[in-house]
Amino acid sequence: MNSPVQRVTAGAVVFDMDGVLIDSRSVIEFAWREAAREYLARDLTEEEVRDHVHGRNGSHTVATLFPGFDERRQRDIWRHVDRIEETAPYEAIPGAAEFVLALADAGTALALVTSSWPAKIDHALDMIGVRAALPVVVHRDEVSRGKPHPEPYLTACSRLDLSPDEVVVFEDSVSGVRSAVEAGAWCVGVGSEDLGDTGVLLTVPDFTDVSVQLDERSTATVLVGGGVPVVDLRRRVGSTGA
């Protein structure tokens, strides 16, 4: 935030879920460590967690960390992890729920692109109160190539009927940012991970200092850092805003 921030115009905002909307990092890590202890009789290393768990599709994680198991056993391991994640308690990233609801009230088109699956998505978003505000969802079972491949975000752009350069994405991992940026979208990094050289517009620690400002015209503006305008948002046709 010390240097000028590029200001862009967009027609939609797209969110990752884990680490962006919900604080799930500890749950995801616990689930895969539990699976490793159960099926490998060892704990995962910090490098394995960093490189193959956070920000990765489960198919990548199970294939990479459990290569000695046949396909049936790998499915059992993945289901073991899924059961933990889809019933765990989640809290919103600070300010995230308020930001999503403010965007929805402003008439902004919104979407979710996540490596999670429907049972976990519904459970988590219901817990933080934003499920109805995210009508477009692209989940892991709807793409053949997950993040960091651009397919998930290209799929979302297609469903929104927008070109990627008309979309702003909020992501928290290197693989997620790569997916968004390589799709051609603008991306804001969220959280503590070093995303400075990944092509993000800027990074924010969470959403406590991110707000939506309405004006008398047909746009709303996303402000960061105490009032720096970053994104001008076109409202959906027919929307009256807040």
Image (cartoon, rainbow, N blue to C red):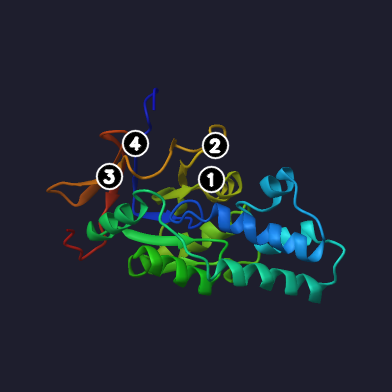
**CA gap, disc 4 and disc 2:** 19 Å
> Which numbered disc covers residue 7?
4
Which numbered disc, 4 or 2, marks the residue closer to the eye? 2
Helix or strand or loop: what does disc 1 sit on?
helix
Label 3 or label 2, whichever comes before in sequence order = 2
Query: Pointer 1 and pointer 4: residues touching (CB < 8 Å)?
Result: no
> Pointer 1: residues within 10 angstroms few (<14), some, or many (20+)?
many
Q: Residue type at mark 1?
A: Val
Rendered location of residue 162, percent (x, y): 41, 58
**Which residue was labeled with disc 2?**
195
Query: Pointer 3 and pointer 2: residues touching (CB < 8 Å)?
Result: no
Label 1 or label 4, whichever comes before in sequence order = 4
> Pointer 3: residues within 10 angstroms few (<14), some, or many (20+)?
many
> Which numbered disc covers residue 211?
3
**Quadrant into which the N terminus falls:** top left
Rendered location of residue 2, percent (x, y): 39, 23
Q: Residue type at mark 4?
A: Arg
